[in-house]
Image (cartoon, rainbow, N blue to C red):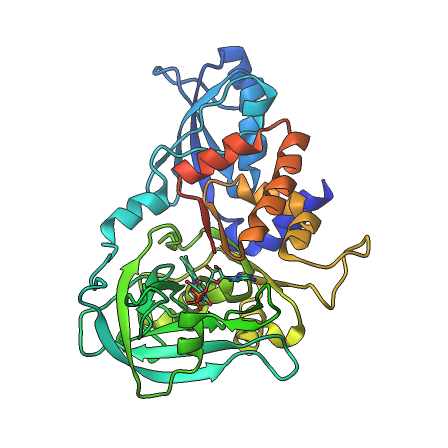
Amino acid sequence: MRTFNNIKTFASSVNENRRFLFEVVGVSQQESNTLDYPIRKSGSVFIAVPYARMNQEMNRINRLGGKIINITPIDGLTPVQSPSQGSSTTTETQPMTQSEPKAKKEKKEVKVPVNIYRPKNPYVGKCLENYELVAEGGSGTVRHLTFDLSAGDLHYLEGQSIGIIPPGEDDNGKPHKLRLYSIASTRHGDNRDDKTVSLCVRQLEYQNDEGETVYGVCSSYLCNLEVGADVAITGPVGKEMLLPDDEDATIIMLATGTGIAPFRAFLWRMFKERELNPDYQFKGLAWLIFGIPYTQNILYKDDLEKMAADYSENFRLTYAISREQQTADGGKMYVQSRVSEYADELFELIQKPNTHVYMCGLKGMEPPISETFTAEAEKRGMNWDDLRKQMKKEERWHVEVY
Ligand code: FAD
């Protein structure tokens, strides 16, 4: 159980003091002695379980034919309902399900703003800054842009996107359609006054069939935007990538390139803006696996590494630098290669009821990551498709690829 010990060591300082009360039915008096707890009149047994032992205890109860009908954090937080555990191998190792996950419950209280500004009547804001994020010698152009929102009512949450309408017309003489961009700033904005929004934009550049270089319309417009210029903005949109309010959650973030944008917002909220969020003091575990081609392409490198150093108990940073690092078998190191390398550890984390997995960036990252998790699930007698669906239902599986 080397890997499990690793997880324990890793998460110990965060979680080891937390305990949960399991309410169990379906065990006989004799079996309840094995569980070391008396059966109540109601037929229930109550067992206090340290956080780190939740999975093992569930398996033990399952082996004894018991069913967990309720799980309550002993520190007085919101009760969560139990997994329904059967006797098959699959259910034995099934993740804990929550009929009303804490994250979901708390999210209901926060109103998620959507479509405050629509394409017919966009918000027009000024560009406050536009700077290059790729260091000398890196590949392509990626810019960090900040827009002024002070003249309107545009507000948003971490994980949402905004639309940008580039000026001019398309080949059919119609006004350009909006393009979506993930918001890279927190709700407070880079100026910490709730009056800006920031993006992280890669200029699309490719060779067409004739061998000519083609540049994307909106990404080129944004990457070349002058400070002080007006920009037409719509939105915000998106509920897929919201960050749960649970301060103890485990947040696994898998990013390629500009897929870092929503995770920059998450990490700033967790670690860089603690004093702005008295009601959100992150104490859980955040793990970013970030794929880029070269070291020079590590977007927001200094900030990420400083946070990883300052909050080493709560933030783990892993790079996959495809053109520089190799896998054990000599292949290129992509995000999915890192997922494969840490598959056992990641899979153990995924089974915790308050672990969320986020994926953002290139479309191609999803299938190989699914393959890795399929294999890990099989090793444990589980079915990844079922588990992923379950996680999606519990709002713990979040994908935004483009
Ligand atoms: P366009 O001028 O619209 O050109 C795009 C078209 O070019 C494609 O439809 C395709 O037909 C063609 N094309 C593209 N590549 C090739 C190729 N290799 N070979 C041949 N043809 C090709 N982008 C970011 O940079 N940062 C973000 O944070 C971000 N977040 C997003 C969030 C969401 C939810 C979504 C849906 C997209 C996001 N995007 C992001 C992508 C962004 O919306 C645009 O699609 C991107 O900037 C390209 O737009 P464009 O106008 O520059 O390109």
> What quarter of the picture does the N terminus occupy?
top right
**Looking at the image, which is closer to me, 31 or 340?**
340
Across and down, in percent, residue 389 comes to 46, 34
Across and down, in percent, residue 358 comes to 48, 52
Q: Is 72 placed left or right of 287 in the picture?
A: left
Above or below: residue 371 compared with residue 312: above
User: Quadrant location of residue 320?
Assistant: bottom right
Task: Please state the total of marks drawn on the protein image.
Answer: 0
Across and down, in percent, residue 5 comes to 67, 46
**Looking at the image, which is closer to me, 4 or 238?**
238
Q: Is 304 placed left or right of 151 in the picture?
A: right
Q: Residue at x 33, y 80 (%)?
A: 191
Above or below: residue 390 compared with residue 229: above
**Looking at the image, which is closer to me, 23 or 135?**
135
Q: Is residue 226 visible?
A: yes
Q: Residue at x 38, y 59 (%)?
A: 159
Above or below: residue 267 compared with residue 302: above
Across and down, in percent, residue 36 comes to 53, 24
Above or below: residue 357 compared with residue 324: above
User: Quadrant location of residue 362?
Assistant: bottom right
Q: Is 22 placed left or right of 318 in the picture?
A: left
Q: Residue at x 35, y 43 (%)?
A: 102
Q: Is residue 277 visible?
A: no
**Looking at the image, which is closer to me, 336 or 188?**
336
